[in-house]
Image (spheres, rainbow, N blue to C red):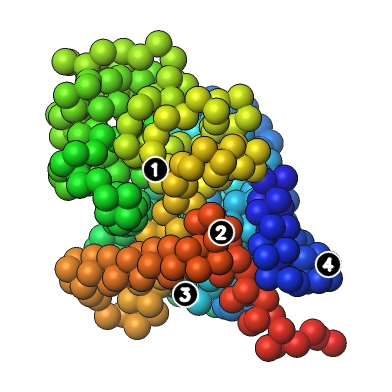
């Protein structure tokens, strides 16, 4: 949360807002912590903890992912919810920000145990969610099956099917074409725009991608398709490199077969996961977890451009170091916003029960990402700000103006 608050503090300073406005924007509107008793497959009972934080509701219902990870705690969920508020405002998606999480390592639980966790969690937070209230979506450790369970549990309790209560659903349940690849496509759109900005053609560029999950895998694939040489990729088990470029399609098949990038034929294992972040590449895409670029390694980052596929991968201290070194950092609230943009498209389609073609979804996504990039880039250039300062202050201004226009009740 310290990094999210530091970013907000800076935006408020740039905008010349007072302390009361900072206090209003710093505090989450609602936070709910719940216990989730789980009957394990062997009959024993375990009690897990979950959270749902709604950071802001000024511009519409709250929106944000649901994370299953051993790292989940209230402080992290608060920060992630705040970033969702700025992301939605920056992309002009009519939502506030939220985030949910359960402290659990999903790899250690069976599918039916995860279903029971999801259903109990949904039931516990159900007074706070709904298509006009708060709309969860996938995040680390959750997927479209999780969203189907959330939707089913919520719908059963209401007595009718409510498609708009979550996004990132499977297609037969009112999911949107183009949603699974949306975050990665968005990352790629802004990465290519940033390359154009520094006047490096995709064919002359190299990239390293940290994380080979929902965001990193697609980003590596789309960057490679655009002609960028992806020279290193990592997951939680290890990092592999090939200076001539990895065959991402073959790597994806290897991961489907073995569960990890480790041991991919024709690649070399890197000594440590951190080494990938320090490679001399044109574009670095941290697409795993928060805080991987920090005080201890930011001085050694050689990439020309960082495109934040993950939420919060750069600490506030590292951000300053990178800015001083002239590294172009495309901030998370812009770079990885493709997911929530297509979540919004999914919600619009579900609420209207009218479905768009994949081309329509992808074209609208590309337009929004490019427009947001241009807006942030121009604002940064005009006011001599970093891309993060520009993006955050534009977003904070949008939210603060909505808040002011509504007035304070009572
Ligand atoms: N979990 C994704 C994010 O962090 C998507 C959220 C959503 O679609 O609501 O942006």
Residue at 20 percent of width and 45 percent of height: 202
Q: For the C terminus, give its image quadrant.
A: bottom right
Answer left or right for 275 relative to 2: left
116 to the left or right of 22:
left
Label 4 crowd bin: few (<14), some (14–19), many (20+), radius 10 Å? few
Of mark 1 and mark 4, the one earlier in the sequence is 4
User: Which mark sits nearer the N-terminus, 3 or 1?
Assistant: 3
Q: Is residue 218 visible?
A: no
Instruction: Name the residue tied to disc 2.
Output: 385
Which-is-in-front pick, marks 4 and 2?
2
Q: Is residue 246 above or below residue 184?
A: above
Marking on residue 305: 1
The yes-or-no answer for disc 3 within 8 Å of ligand 1 is: no
Q: Is residue 249 above or below residue 126?
A: above
**First reached walking from the N terminus: tag 3 or tag 4:** 4
Q: Is residue 306 left or right of residue 282?
A: right
Q: Disc 3 or 2, which lies upstream in sequence?
A: 3
Snapshot quadrant of residue 253: top left
Q: Are marks 4 and 2 in contact (CB under 8 Å)?
A: no
Residue 317 pos. (x, y %) = 65, 38
What is the distance, in whole Å, between disc 3 and disc 4 at their CAs? Answer: 25 Å
Q: Nearer the viewer, residue 338 or 119?
A: 338
Q: Which mark is residue 92?
A: 3
SS at circle 1: strand
User: According to the image, label 4 marks what residue?
Assistant: 19
The residues bearing labels 3 and 2 have C-alpha atoms spaced at a distance of 21 Å
Classify 278 as above or below 91.
above
| Disc nearer the start of the sequence (1/2) | 1
């Amino acid at each position: 949360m310290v990094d999210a608050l530091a970013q907000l503090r800076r935006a408020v300073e740039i905008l010349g807002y007072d302390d009361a406005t900072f206090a209003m924007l710093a505090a989450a509107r609602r936070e709910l912590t719940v216990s989730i008793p789980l009957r394990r497959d062997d009959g024993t009972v375990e009690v897990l903890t979950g959270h749902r934080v709604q950071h802001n509701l000024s511009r519409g219902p709250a929106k944000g992912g649901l994370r299953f990870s051993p790292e989940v705690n209230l402080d992290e969920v608060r920060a992630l919810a705040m970033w969702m508020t700025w992301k939605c405002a920056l992309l002009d998606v009519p939502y506030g920000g939220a985030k949910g999480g359960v402290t659990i390592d999903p790899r250690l639980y069976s599918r039916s145990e995860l279903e029971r966790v999801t259903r109990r969690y949904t039931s516990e937070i159900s007074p706070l969610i709904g298509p006009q209230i708060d709309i969860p979506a996938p995040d680390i450790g959750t997927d479209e099956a999780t969203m189907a369970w959330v939707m089913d549990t919520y719908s059963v309790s209401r007595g009718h099917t409510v498609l708009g209560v979550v996004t990132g659903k499977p297609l037969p349940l009112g999911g949107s074409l183009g949603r699974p690849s949306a975050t990665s496509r968005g990352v790629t759109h802004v990465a290519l725009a940033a390359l154009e900005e520094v006047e490096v053609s995709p064919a002359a560029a190299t990239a390293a991608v940290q994380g080979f999950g929902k965001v990193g895998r697609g980003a590596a694939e789309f960057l490679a398709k655009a002609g960028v040489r992806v020279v290193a990729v990592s997951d939680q088990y290890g990092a592999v490199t090939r200076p001539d470029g990895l065959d991402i399609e073959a790597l994806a098949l290897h991961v489907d077969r073995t569960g990890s990038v480790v041991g991919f034929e024709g690649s070399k294992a890197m000594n440590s996961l951190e080494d990938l972040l320090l490679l001399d590449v044109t574009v670095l895409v941290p697409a795993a977890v928060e805080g991987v670029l920090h005080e201890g390694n930011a001085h050694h980052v050689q990439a020309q451009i960082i495109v934040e596929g993950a939420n919060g991968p750069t600490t506030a201290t590292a951000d300053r170091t990178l800015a001083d070194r002239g590294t172009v950092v495309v901030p998370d609230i812009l770079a990885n916003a493709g997911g929530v943009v297509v979540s919004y498209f999914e919600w619009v389609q579900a609420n209207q029960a009218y479905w768009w073609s994949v081309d329509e979804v992808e074209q609208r996504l590309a337009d929004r990402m490019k427009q947001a990039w241009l807006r942030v880039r121009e604002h940064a250039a005009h006011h001599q700000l970093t891309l993060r300062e520009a993006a955050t202050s534009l977003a904070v201004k949008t939210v603060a103006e909505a808040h002011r226009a509504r007035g304070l009740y009572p």
